[in-house]
Each structure stands twice: as structure tokens, then as C-alpha cells.
Image (cartoon, helix red, strand yellow):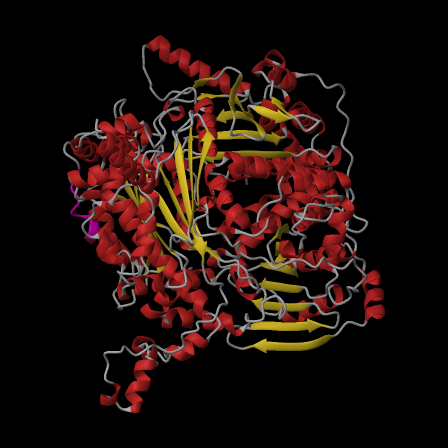
Amino acid sequence: MLDEPLTPHEEIRRGTLANGLKYVILPNKVPEGRFEAHLEMHVGSVDEREDEQGLAHLVEHVTFLGSRKRDQWLGSGTRGNAYTDFHHTVFHIHAPTTNKDGHYMPPNVLDILYDVAFAPQLLDTRVAKEKKAVLAEAQMMNTIEYRVDCQLLEHLHWDNLLGTRFPIGKLDQVEAWPAQAVRDFHARWYFPANATLYVVGDFDASVDEVEGMISAAFDEAAPAEGAEEAESPLKRHAVRPPVKHAYGAPSYELDEIQRSNDEAKASGKDDPFLPFVAPEGKVSMFQHEHLSNASFNIFSKLAVKPLEKMGDLHRTILQRIVLLVLQSRIQARYAETNADYKRIELDHSDSAREGCCVSTVTVTCEPREYEFALQVAVEESRRLQKFGLTPSELDRFKAAMLRDSEQLAQQAGCVPSLENLDFVMEQDACGHVVMDQVAGHEALVRMSDYITLEACNGACDELLGFIGEYGVENNRKPNSGKCTAIVACVPATMTNVDGETVPFDITPERIEQVLAADYGEITEPEDIFVPEVLIADDEINALIEQTAPTFTEATYHEPTGVYQRTLSNGIRVNYKVLDAEPGSAFLRLVVPGGRSVESPNIGPGGIGSSAVGLRTVQEAGDVGEWSRKQIELLTMQHLLVYDVEPEVEYMFLDSAFATDGGLRTILEIMHLTLTKPTWDEQALERVKDIYRMFQINTNKNIELLTHDTVNAVIYEDRRIMDPNKEALQALTLDGVRDMIEAQFASGALELNIVGDIIPEEVDEMVLAFMGSIQTKPAPPLPQVPPLKLKEVPKDDPVRAQRLWLKDSDERACAVAAGPGPSMWAPMTSLYSEIPSFVNQDAYTPEQIAALRDPVNEVASAKGNPFAQQSARRANSLATYCAGMMLAEVIGGRLFTTVRDALGLTYDCNFTMSFGLQNNDATTYRLLVTSTPEKIDEALNAGVRVLRGFQMQRVSQREVDRARLTLLSRHEMDLKTNNYWADLMQCTNTPDLAPLKKIQCVADLPLMYDAMTVDDLQEVYDRLGLSEGEIFTSVTIAGQTEPPPFLSKKDVDAAALAAQTLTAALGGINIAEAIKRLKKEQSPSASAE
């Protein structure tokens, strides 16, 4: 059986046009009425010459934005973009099958892709503009996380260009290229035989007809000059990307690789892509002041083994089970040992972008704990190599994989087109057979009898030898893999046991010693009992008899299909049957209170107690009589993922799960968490450590720091921000327990469930497990002031702040913020003012009424109940819907002006912080990133765009585009369980969100559809944009602190004083000198 070929996806159609362009077509009905078209050009950064580093990415920018036809169709529900990687450049369009005007879109979208790739306008002006955009993009993306990724790739791929040819390129080269370099690169690589087109979606046409559209759109694309004689790069390069790899495979494979190299050398052949044997990897270290955790990345690079036969699939299943077992064991030991933060991540996967398979072990920990964290990873790897899995581990993990596969098969017809397309493109690039989910599950079921202890244990050496046998080169097992690279990314300083910041003294040699050390005799692992249920039937029956739970209210909302219940203990329930994700469901428990009920003062149960307390319950992991390890293994069996999040006005507990058995398990967990939470001192300290790291990260992250600086001056207290070091130190276990248990005992909880559920089963289980929860006495919540914005004088200097962040690289970020309307704020102007120049005597009373209460005629023609202004503005969603559409409009203008026309930034965006249900502390945010030299100019340009709406009002075209964008997003998101939980939450909590009723969910798309220019302008007029309302913060990062910033107002005042002095005393014109100095050193001006 294992020699049988895998069954390829029957619905995929593949073909090649006469000019060499390849295409892949896959019909897919989700989302309905939409499709994806992605054109993959097989050229990336590794194809660049030495003096072309970054040119593939620049060509992507110029071709996509240089298309004559792109702007004709992008918009109106159609979105497009492009990206460049090591091995390819991809242009992608997401479109409705038929647009709002009834136009059938697939031919037009294909025509756009043809124009982008094979007939773009490569104008000098566009090249110059996109060079600015690329330089700004490089500044924006150069975060510490990006730099870490570059370090990992550089040392993982020390053997080829992947370690140095990053797509963003070398900026000095980008600045220097003439436009002709773009044209030359395009001519060399952009020809049909070097492209593959992927079209996936709901075409409203047969596959034959789609093939005809592809032929009509791309047949005219001419092969590149000389392409008839030269082989296509697709054939010339057997593996993309075209690089040579050094592998750390088991010794029997390495012997074959070495033999091939010896034969090539003896025969004088020079094969540029022939792999070679890697030496055992040594530690490379990246130490930086902006890192807060220590991470150790241990790699083994292997060849991609194409999935073609059942045996290939069998091998990957065994590997996955082994990794899951090892990760579970290591993380369990981390949680059991002490209060310091530690995390392990394991991966073994094929990478199309890198053309190889990589096994990875990543250990992340507090710097002072790194030796112990690495020791645990090594010990558990050796234990699994020596003793293998336990029988119960195999049973549990195999059952979980079968259930996961079954769920994927159930959802085969519900996978979005974009996910299917990305999967097919990745599988194709790796040379794998593309199977559909049903065939994949059937194959797994057939081979399940061959997933044995012996088979899994046999995979342990090959998969884990690179870490378990590090440093024993001469004593390695024959089938053990070899480590090929180790990268340590560590901070420059650490916090010692006394809380002091000291240098982090670590060396590559010491890391290698820890990995290779002998830790004594490895003992056999203990098996763990995993219960089938957490609350026995007789126990829950006794609780039901004692509490006699009932539904005091039960309704069904026809427009949304939402069931609403109220339990006799006060808990509210919303649930909806949704078959978009068969076999799965999502649950959210909303606990009113959250950060807003914390005391704003530091103390044992003060600021931060809700956030830290809730995460402490999760981190402890025990519920009732069951340990964290038992809970983790049980949840794994039901594909149950569980998380918590402390928000400003409430806390929520989220879970996604398989509906077959999962609903009972998660309701049992909720019941025990609410009634018998475990409070553990070490768990509290681990959570404090996490929040301390949050603070350190914030202080080292330019975007977070800039936002935090604004938050500190715009809000009255820190409840809307993470607790700082002093607040964390003051919190105690008793303090956080009192805060959390008081909220748990409030009785006003709301449970939301959506997915592939049965209403009768939900009612029965909710009544049993949530209805039987008894309210218990709890400490009263402290009486605290409401959240609000701080009253800051108009001329207070804190309104314009500047920061310097020490960094090895230069970057800059700016934020502008100010007050805005809350999401439930009423639109007070229900009726329009009639202009004074209108002679009302000339109009009938009906005409006057129509002028005061205009109708959106387009919405009215659709029968929209909110077409009339007074009806629309009386709806509680009016401000929210208009605000969301306004944010889209502002974002469009920012892109057009600040990014595209002025070339000052790559990233400039605007958001309205709609999220608070019952507080007025609502703000807007403008975020700009740029170079230090241009950041002030970019910020001022962004603020001018915001203020420009006072003169250049929102246009009807902008409203229509924003409407279509939001409605399209809403329609697509309605197919997901999570989004429905977002919509339903707080519709059954009258104290928390009195204006959010279940009818709001039905009204939302109708309100978007009815919005007018005047509605958006009404919300705009309530944004605080004047000099006395706006707050700005500019952060510049670099090695040296910049000179003091002088605003335009400062310079003008100094110039006036200098002119006066010059006139009185004679001498040189100091005023002109100051102005000249200002012009040379800083291009910024005040945001006036």
C-alpha cells in the first residue's frame, strides 16, 4: 500500500499556452460570487546579479503601479497587490465574479494581469516614485523582528545566496539605478514561459470557458527575445530557487551526496546546484539592545522529498506525531519547574521559497534561564530517541490527527479560494502531488494501522538526532540527522535575580557546551492518565438537582438566526448554527468588568489586576482536580484551542473546538474555571514576567513606544495600557484573585457559541454546565472613576512630543491622535439645516420636509429602511458605520497624497478606536513611518490630509468605494465562526452595551448601504483636529541622538528676534542664517 501513488486533486485543470505560459484552474464556491487570480513570475531576489540587489522588488512595484488598466477596475469590490520573495514575484487580484454594475469580471481581471506583467508602462516618473516608496518601505520593515529573521536566514543559508539576497535589496543600489535598469530586468525575466497563472474561485462559467478566457487574455503575450532558442528558467532550474544547499541528512544519505560530489569533481563537471555535505553547525550569535528575550534556533537543513506515494505521506505523519509529542513534553516540564518564562517551538517543513526542508527547534526564554531551558530541550529529545512514545501518547496523538483530518475533509467545500490557491502554489513549488482534503483523509484512514509505535519510534532518530546528538559527530546513529546551523538571538542586557539590569554575558562556546553536555542517565517517561470527561455525569446531575436551572427567557431572532437565552442564575447565552466550517465551532465567554473596574492606583489588587489575574488562571492551567498536563492532552483530543484576553471593559475566554465531544469539554472547562479556578504563585510570577517583557518590548519598539507616549498623555490613567514595572511588583496573588473572582461571580456573564452545532444539544449542555453555576459571595469591586480622556491645556508642550530611541539602524515613526466620537454616540443632527439663501416661501411644506430630511435614492430603490436620513441617524449604529467608512476614505487619501504623490512614506494609515462599549475615551490615530529626515514632513502632510476634509469634502466616489470595501469584507467574514462571535457578543448584556441589540447585526449591512456623504462629514466634524485638540509624538531611532527639533514657529520667532537685533546693532543677517540652517538640517514644519 505504501508504494501506491497519491491521488491528485481531480478538479484541478492544468495547461500550457503556445507561448509557454502555464496555468492552473480550480473551481471553488467559497466565498460565493468571488474568485482569485494570481500570476506568479518565476523570478525573485536570488535571480538578481551582483549589482541588481533589490531590482526584482522594484520591478514588481513599477509594473503593478505602472499598469494602464489596473486603476480602471481595482475598487468596486476588487482588490489587488503584489509581493516579491527569493524565488518568485506574484501579482494577485481578488474580485467579484460580477461587479456592482453587473459587469462580468474574470476577463477584465485576466486582462489586468496581462497588462501588469507583459505590457506595463515603465515610465521614468513611475520608477522615480517607486524608488522612494521602496526606500520608505525598507525603513518601515526594518524592525528588530525583521533583523532577527535576516540573521536566521543568513546563518541557516550560509552556503548560498539565500543568506544575503533579501528581496528589499541594497538601498544604495536602489537609489542609483536608472529607469533603464528596470526595463532591462523586466525584458530579461518577464516572458510567458517564465510565468504560471493560478485562477481559483466561483467563476460562474465552466473550466473550459475559463481556459478560453485565459487564452484570449494571454495569447498575445510574446515570448521574450531569444526565448525560442533558450530554455525557460522553469526547465533550466530543476529546483526553484536555483541555489546549492549543504544538507545535514542521515549518514546514509550524506554518503550518497558525498559520492556524487566526488564523481563530479573527478569528471571535471561543474554542477552549480549539486548539494554537498554540511559540517556540524556552530553557534552564530546576534546580540542587540532591542531584544528582550533570548531565543536559540537550532536548524537541520534537508532536501525536499516530494510527496508522491502513500509512503511519503506516511513518513510526514510519523514526523508530525513525534514533533507534537516532544513539544508537549518539553512545554510540560517548563510549566512544572519555576516561575520564569520559557517556550519551545518545533517545526519540520518544506519551504518552497528556500528550496529545501528545514527541521527547527526554537527555545525562547528569560536570558538568565537559558542554560536550563536548553538542557530540558536536549534531555527530552534524548529521552524520546531512547524510549520512544508511550502507547497512550501514540493513541492520543494519532486520534487527534485523524480527527483533524476528518474535520478538514468535512470542510472540503468550505475552504476559501485564497487558502486553496496558496496551498496549490506551495505544493506545486515543492513538487508534491496536490490532493483534495477528502482524498487526503481517506489515505490517512487507510494507513492508520501502519502508524505504530515501532514506526513512530523509528522516525525519532532521523528527526531529533540533530539536537539530541549534537556534539557527538563520531558517535552518531546511522539514521540520525545533523545540525547545520545554530543562531542565538539574545539581548545585550538581562535582569538578574535581584531585579537589576546587568550585561548579558554569553558566548557561542558556552551555548555549544550546554547543547552537547552529558546530563546523566535518561529515565523512561511516565504515562499520564487523561480523563474522558472533567465533570462526571453523577456530579453534574447532583448539581442540576441542587440548583434546578431553567431558562427564564428564550427567543429566536429570525433575521440573523441567533438564539438568545437567559439562565436562572443570570448568565446570558447567544448561539447560532453556521455550517461554513463543518465539524467545528467557536465559543466566547464575555465577563463584564475588565480593566475598567481596576483601581487606577498601584496596589495588591490595583492597576493591572484584571489583566494579570485572568492570565494567571490560564497560566496555572489546572481546573478542579485536573492538572494542566491532563487538560492539555484532553483538549488536544478534541482539537480544542483555548485563550483568554483581558479587554478594557470586559474579559473574554475564547475557544475553537471540534463539535464532536468538544462542546462538552469546553463547557466543563468554563464551569470549573468560574467555580474552582486554581491560583498558583509561580503562575502569577510567570505572568508578571510576560508583562515585564511586554514593557521592555514596548520601550524598544519604535511603533509601540510612539503609541504608548501618546496614550500616557491622552488618557486619564493607565487602565487602558499594560501595567508597568511598579504596578506589577505591587500585585499579589490575593489581590488579583479577589479582582477576578468578583467579576466571575457577577452573574452578568454572556456565552456566545457559533458553528456546526445542534440547538437542542446546546440548550441541554448550557443548561447543565452553565445553569448549574451557583453565584457565591465575592469581594465587592472597588468604586473607580470612569475611563476618560485627560484634559490637557491647548498650549501644553506635552501635545507635541519627541523621543529618541537608541538603535543600530535609523528609523522614524510618528503618531497623531485626538478625541473622536464613541461608537454608540448618537448622531444629534437628525435633520439637515436648510441653507439661508433658500427662499422657503417658494417651496411646499412637503418639499421643505424633503430638504430637511433627504433620502438616499439609490438605497431607497433597493427598499432599504434606512434610506431616509432621520431613520438612518436615529439608528444606534449610525456613528459607527459612518466612522468606519470615513476611516476607509481617509486611508485612501493618505495613500494617494502622502505615499503616492509626495513619496514621503510607505505606510500611512488612519484608524478610529471604536471598541469601548460604555465609555467616551474614544480617539482616532494617524500612524506614519518614514526616514528620520522626512518624518516631520510626512507627519505634517498626513495632518494636512486630515484637515483637508474641511475644504475638500468627502466625495460620492469615495463613499461608494468605502461602502463596497466594507460590505465585501462583511460578506466574506460572515462565513467564519469567529466573526459571528464578534457580532453577537454584548448583544445580551444590557448593563455593558445597552444600545447593542441583536437587531444591530441585521442592520449593519443595511446601514453601510444607506450611508451618504453628509453622514461621513457629520462624523468627521466631531474629530478633534485643531491645534488645541491634536496630540503628536515623533520617535527617531539611530545610533546618535538627533539635534533639538525646531518647529517652524520656533524658527520664525528666532528669525524675528534676530532681525530686530540686526536692525538695532547692524552686522550680518542672523535671521537669514537661521532660516538657511533650518532648511538644510530639518525639512519639517509644524502641523498647522
**Can you name the residue that lies furthest to the front here?**
1064
The residue positioned 35% from the left and 26% from the top of the image is 165
The x, y position of residue 604, in whole percent, is 74, 45
Pick the quarter of the image with the N terminus.
top right
Which portion, as a residue range, is magenta? 217-223
Residue 157: x and y in percent read 43, 23
Residue 502 % position (x, y): 62, 22
Q: Can residue 729 be seen in this view?
A: yes
Task: Judge whether residue 83 can be spotted in this image.
Answer: no
How would you classify the magenta stretch by its main secondary structure? loop
Q: Is residue 295 magenta?
A: no
Residue at the outermost top position: 266
Residue 742 placement: quadrant: bottom right
Q: In the rendered view, tell whether residue 158 sits above or below residue 1003.
A: above
Q: Where is residue 284 in the image (x, y as percent from the top left)?
A: 51, 19
Relative depth, front residue between 438 and 174: 174
Occupied quadrant, residue 371? top right
- Image position of 846 (left or right of 739): left
Q: Is residue 133 positioned above or below 108 on the image?
A: above
* Viewer-closest of 442 and 482: 482
**Towards the viewer: 576 or 54:** 54
Quadrant housing residue 680? top right
Q: How many marks?
A: 0
Residue sitting at x 30%, y 75%: 858
Question: In the displayed structure, does residue 850 sit left or right of residue 449?
Answer: left
Q: Nearer the viewer, residue 75 or 637?
A: 75
